[in-house]
Image (cartoon, grey):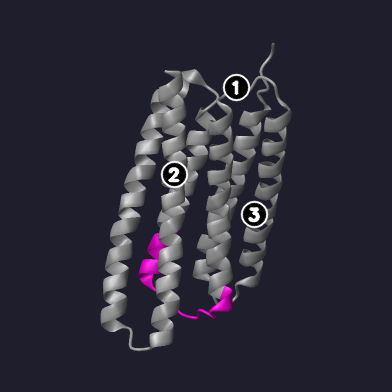
Amino acid sequence: MPREVRFFELFNAHAAQIVEGSHALVRLMENVSSPDEHARRIDEAERSADKITHETIAKLHTTFITPLDRDHIHKLITNMDDILDLIQDVAESLVLYDIRRVTPEARQLTQICQMTCERVNAAVRMLASPKSAEALLKTCDEIDRLESDADRVMRSAMSRLFREEADVKELIKLRSIYEQLELITDRCEDVANILEGIILEHS
């Protein structure tokens, strides 16, 4: 019986929305005084990704033979969806907290998030091709290294924040933003771990 290969198309479409959301977040972080347009683009990307997630799960329930293990498909699409949910959380927090001043560390963390999301996109697009297994695993290693970079920036940012920020309200706001940004890279690493598991199981 033929296998349903549309799952790979859905993964790719979702990964494209992750990249769109991460790019919009970088632009938002650079223009916190005018957040509306960038926040709107993030919301659109998140809604589009949600539809793809629901379609993937619905197809999983109605497909007899799947190209990957059912549990892997479910974990992959839901963990990918978590990335965009967190991107949206950061955007909402920037607006709700009325953040007017963005630190260099926040910008750096956002750039790392973007790079990590781009590599998630690249890795997901290799999943359908057995010949790309080695390149996919290498990309997953890059995601792991970027997540470690985000950890280091996060620790440095927190240290400077508690040493230098006299305004307690500002400290609380920025700490929350830092933590949410670092969580984005954690979720990207989760996706990388799932992809590695799929490749190793099928090798």
Q: Name the residue under label 3.
A: 46
Q: Quadrant of residue 53?
A: top right
Is 202 on the left or on the right of 38, as rendered? left
- Is 90 in front, or is 1? 1
Q: Is residue 23 in sight in this rendering?
A: no
Which corner quadrant of the image does residue 9 belong to?
Answer: top right
Which residue is painted at 40% across and 61% down in the image? 109
Q: What element carries label 2?
A: helix
Residue tagged by mark 1?
67
Identified at 41% across, 31% down, the residue is 196
Residue 174 seen in the current view: yes
Residue found at x 58% / y 48%? 81
Image location (x, y in percent) of residue 21: 58, 55
Q: Position of residue 180 (x, y in %)?
A: 46, 63
- The answer to whether residue 154 is magenta is no
Q: Which amino acid does label 2 sit on?
A: Asp
Calculate the distance from the C-alpha at mark 1 to the C-alpha at mark 2.
21 Å
